């Protein structure tokens, strides 16, 4: 997987307003505002294994006008999730109610 390619695919119709990156395995966080987005995307332009096992991608938060994109992970498998930036009763990320 390539984080830059995934982010550009998820934001193809929206401008990116900011990107926050925490380098994997560190507490070092970089924050890039609108005029530095290309620099952030260069930081994220590398291939990594997104399959089960160890996490290899950086932790990210990407802000657009209407969405927030974050890295999700389960058992080492990684993917990016696009969420509404503002509360929206039409968006329900999980089942509600008894089973």
Image (tube, rainbow, N blue to C red):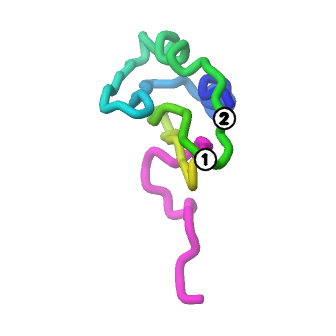
Q: Is residue 4 left or right of residue 32?
A: right
Where in the figure is residue 16, as x and y percent of width and height? 51, 24
Where, by quadrant of the figure, is residue 7 drawn? top right
Look at the image and tell me in which quarter the N terminus lies.
top right
Quick one: label 1, few (<14), some, or many (20+) residues within 10 Å? few
Quick one: label 2, few (<14), some, or many (20+) residues within 10 Å? some
Magenta stretch: dominant secondary structure = loop
Spatial CA distance of label 2 from label 1 is 9 Å
Provide the secondary structure element on which disc 1 rests: loop
**Residue situated in front as seen by the camera: 88 or 58:** 58
**Magenta segment boundaries in residue numbering:** 78-99
Where, by quadrant of the figure, is residue 6 drawn? top right
* Image height of 19 relative to 50, above or below: above
Q: Is residue 49 left or right of residue 56?
A: right
- Name the residue rendered at 43%, 49% in the picture: 86
- Name the residue rendered at 47%, 17% in the picture: 40
Which mark identifies residue 49? 2
* Image height of 34 relative to 66, above or below: above
Which mark identifies residue 41? none
Provide the secondary structure element on which disc 2 rests: loop
Disc 2 and disc 1 in contact, CB within 8 angstroms: yes
- Name the residue rendered at 65%, 39% in the picture: 50
* Image height of 43 relative to 19, above or below: above
| Residue 13 visible here | no
Residue denoted by label 1: 53
Where in the figure is residue 24, as x and y percent of width and height? 44, 32
């Amino acid at each position: 997987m390539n984080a830059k390619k995934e982010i550009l695919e998820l934001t193809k119709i929206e401008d990116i307003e900011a990107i926050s990156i925490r380098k994997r395995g560190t507490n070092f966080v970089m924050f890039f505002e609108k005029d530095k987005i290309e620099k952030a995307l260069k930081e994220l332009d590398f291939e990594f294994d997104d399959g089960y096992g160890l996490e290899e991608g950086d932790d990210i938060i990407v802000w657009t006008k209407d969405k927030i994109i974050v890295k999700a992970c389960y058992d080492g498998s990684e993917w990016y999730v696009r969420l509404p930036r503002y509360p929206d009763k039409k968006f329900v990320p999980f089942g509600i109610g008894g089973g």
